[in-house]
Amino acid sequence: MSILIDKDTRLLVQGITGREGLFHSNKMMNYGTKIVAGVTPMKGGDWVLNGKVPVFDTMKRAVKATGANCSVIFVPARFAVDAMLEAIDAEIPLIVCITEGVPIQGMMRVCNYMDHKTACLIGPNCPGLITPGECKVGIIPGDITEQGRVGVVSRSGTLTYEVLYALKQHGRGVSTCVGIGGDPINGTSFIDILGLFEGDPNTDRVVLIGEIGGTDEERAAEYISDHMTKPVIALIAGKTAPPGKRMGHAGAIIEGGSGLAADKIRVLKNAGVAIAEYPEQIPELID
Amino acid sequence: MKLHEYQSKRLFAKYGIPIPRGRVAATASEAKLIAEELGGRVVVKSQVLVGGRGKTGGVRLAHDAEEAEDLATQIMGMKIKGLPVRKVLIDEAANIRTEIYLGVANDRRARCPVMIASAEGGIEIEEVARTMPEKIIRLHLDPTQKLRRYQSFYIAQSIELPRDLWRDFYKIAYGLYEAYLNTDANLAEINPLVITDDGRLLALDGKMVLDDNALFLHAELEEMRDLDEEAPEERRARMYGLSYVKLDGNIGCMVNGAGLAMVTMDVIKLFGGEPANFLDIGGGAGAEKVSAALRIILSDPNVKAILINVFGGITRCDEVARGVLSALEEMESNIPMIARLVGTNEEGGRRLLAKSNMITAISLADAAQKAVAAVKKGDAE
């Protein structure tokens, strides 16, 4: 068991014929993910990945023909809003947008549209998800983590890999790892994923990786103290970041005195969360 | 991308928002000429991309054109919060009865735009939020709709605006929301929006911050970017697709990924060091990009040690090593370097770096401790 994705996930790749899309589709397939379709407008009828995966022009056709139940988006930023809206319209229940650099107002319109629909959107600007041993959707390297009982949820990319690697080195495996993305506005927040982990019988404890900017960690703290019975360990990046400067991720910025790492750490501690100073400390805090 | 006051107000004017008569000047004599044209009292306003210009003497009132010229000379010799003043805006002076705040911003939590207003204008809204939070009115807006009349009336009533100004206020609030939507802004702000002593609404100051990720939709706005306002190293980094922020410490960092880069800085600090910068080489960086990154770090004279932390996923450790070596060939350097390479092709990377005098580390904590020790050793010598 796991959350969101497993061995029965039927994955569709939006932008499968692009450089990134094709490269990572290969990796996902080699990991064991069932890729059932790709979509690239005006390339419908092609077959990719050694002729195993059909390409469609539109999402509606692809979903109808293949029964895909999850979509991962690799299209360039200028087409990403379109791709997300198309996936929502095609009634795909789980949409994962890897693309970085999506305009914020575009995301506002996507979220606004989603309010009237049932889709779950992860990202954008995220590394995707992995349920070790079963399925990976996105770009998380498959060999740095193995099956286990720790749930991981993160706003970061390589920092997540670092944590997965540290867990593996200490013999700790993962039930599912979800990268929710580093943008100011994303489809899914910490609390959505924490709720899923709380209800997952195969997850014993959760690692939360946050960073400066916004109030997602503060809301997570509130949720943890009100609803979580499983222990949570957190790592918050950006204690040394100066205010007013964007630290790479569009969402990682301290604005108007809010979004400070110290504030996030304080409220998480108050909610009973163990705080790690650096990735290698996380396995120690679990033991 | 931040816009200057004069650029923001010019945009506002296009959306029907009344602004004072005035123009921007790059020299004192130009300032005088504009003041003569306007006649009467003018305000000489420094155009730099920081808040709090007024408090530092960057905004001054001139009674005639001669005085405007003098003040422009003074102000253009100033540095405000480290930024040199290269332009001044010469605006007709207004007689102010009341100052209001009106802005539109992104509400991250509600995932939609929010219009913010306050009867306490003229001071920074963060200050109002801290000291008089009850004086701030917030209204969430639908990003797919235009501002409705009743929404502006709700705000007008909440800030106790006289009823005879509600129609004009609607036009201004409507225009501001249109400006925000049409430019993909993160922030569009009028502070202060004043009521003049003859009872008109006027946008005395304007501020806009645009979404860098949306500039591909607005080529005409990208041209407004003021390259002078960016630190030269940060501009160079941007050209190479690197994300770089200079800090005050002495341990340079080169990392792949923003979150990991921040944690690397935090760990340096945890073990008693001070990071010299944030630098994210991004995913899948080639040797050329890595080399550029290292050259940027080496050009900072404060740097006494460099920590390279790469967790290879799409980034290949051997590519990183090649980039490091090529930068070192170009720039002689005795600065101690600590490398921690893990992941894709890490063996190849380590083998390449073995030929140089690089200190290697097995973990991030180990690398940070070695970097701090290297700085201390350098100081002792």
Image: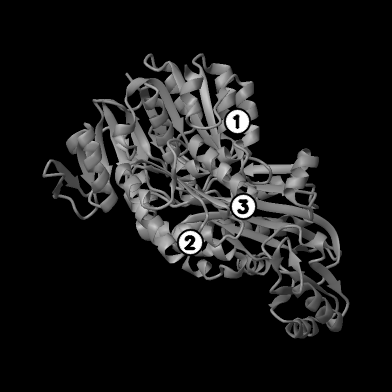
Give x and y (percent) for residue B82: 71, 63
Q: Mark 2 points at which residue?
A: B295
Closer mark to the observer between disc 2 and disc 3: 2
Disc ID at residue A218? 1
Instruction: Kindly identify the residue that appears in the image at 79 percent across and 81 percent down.
Output: B35
Closer mark to the observer between disc 1 and disc 2: 2
Q: Which chain carries label 1?
A: A
**Which residue ends up furthest to the front in the rendered image?**
B381
Disc ID at residue B22? none
- Do marks 1 and 2 share a chain? no
The answer to whether mark 2 and mark 3 are in CB contact below 8 A is no
Give above or below for A287 relative to B102: above
Give x and y (percent) for residue B109: 57, 38
Disc ID at residue B247? 3
Instruction: Kindly identify the residue that appears in the image at 45 percent across and 27 percent down.
Output: A193
Residue type of the residue flagged with mark 3: Leu
Near-viewer residue (B215 or A82): B215
Q: Which chain carries label 2?
A: B
Near-viewer residue (B376 or B51): B376
- Do marks 2 and 3 share a chain? yes
Q: Is mark 2 on a helix, strand or loop?
A: helix
Give above or below for B72 relative to A97: below
- Do marks 1 and 3 share a chain? no
The answer to whether mark 1 and mark 2 are in CB contact below 8 A is no
